[in-house]
Amino acid sequence: MSECGKKITTLPLVPKKTKSAQDGLQFPVGRVYRLLKRGNYADRIGPGAAIYLAAVLEYLSAEILELAGNAAHENKKARILPRHIQLAMRNDDELNKLLSCVTIAQGEVLPNVLPKLLPKKTILLKLAHKYVQSQEF
């Protein structure tokens, strides 16, 4: 018996890589692309737009989480609370400008005391100490 037909070669099954994994992102590029298409933001949406938007969202969330983690560490807490996110956003100039219209539930406000309300420093102690005579003769 001779083998006259074509040989069938089977390729090993390689699992598909997601678009996020191809681009080195954690945020879902496919979901962002689907939401951009369904959102009627434009007539045509290119695949690069979804990758770019996912990368920007990932960067912003990582930045906010890092600053909020630092705020939680300063308050000796192990968990990030809405208060820590609020402190992180309001203490950073660029994030404060970007998210100026955003209200965070249970975020409270930044501690701020007007200088006029603080007690005045007394100079009398220094002046009184100057006119005290020494006890040596």
Image (cartoon, rainbow, N blue to C red):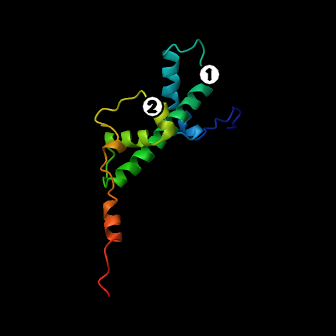
Q: Nearer the viewer, mark 1 or mark 2?
A: 2
Q: Residue at x 59, y 31 (%)?
A: 52
Question: Measuring 53% from the left and 15% from the top, which residue is drawn there?
Answer: 41
Q: Residue at x 48, y 21 (%)?
A: 35
Residue 18 visible at all: no
Q: CA distance from mark 1 to mark 2?
A: 27 Å
Mark nearer the N terminus (1 vs 2)? 1
Q: Position of residue 54 (x, y in %)?
A: 53, 32
Query: Label 2 is placed on what type of residue?
Result: Leu
128 left or right of 101 in image: left
Position in image of residue 135 (x %, y %) = 29, 83
Q: Position of residue 17 (x, y in %)?
A: 55, 37
Pointer 2 residue: 99
Query: Of 96 and 17, which appears nearest the observer?
Result: 96
Q: Amino acid at mark 1?
A: Gly
What residue is at 36 percent from the left and 29 percent from the top?
103
**Quadrant hosting residue 101:** top left
The correct choice, above or below, for 72 with respect to 126 in the image is: above
In which quadrant will I find the C terminus?
bottom left
**Which of these two is toward me, 39 or 96?**
96
Q: Residue furthest bottom?
A: 137
State whether residue 48 appears in this view. Answer: yes
Which residue matches tag 1?
Answer: 46
Q: Nearer the viewer, residue 113 or 9?
A: 113
Across and down, in percent, residue 78 comes to 31, 52
Q: Secondary structure at mark 2?
A: loop
Disc 1 is placed on an element classified as loop
Quadrant of the snapshot with the N terminus:
top right
- Mark 1, other Cα within 10 Å: few <14 / some 14–19 / many ≥20: few
The residue sitting at the front extreme is 137
Depth check: give the residue in front, 80 or 2. Answer: 80
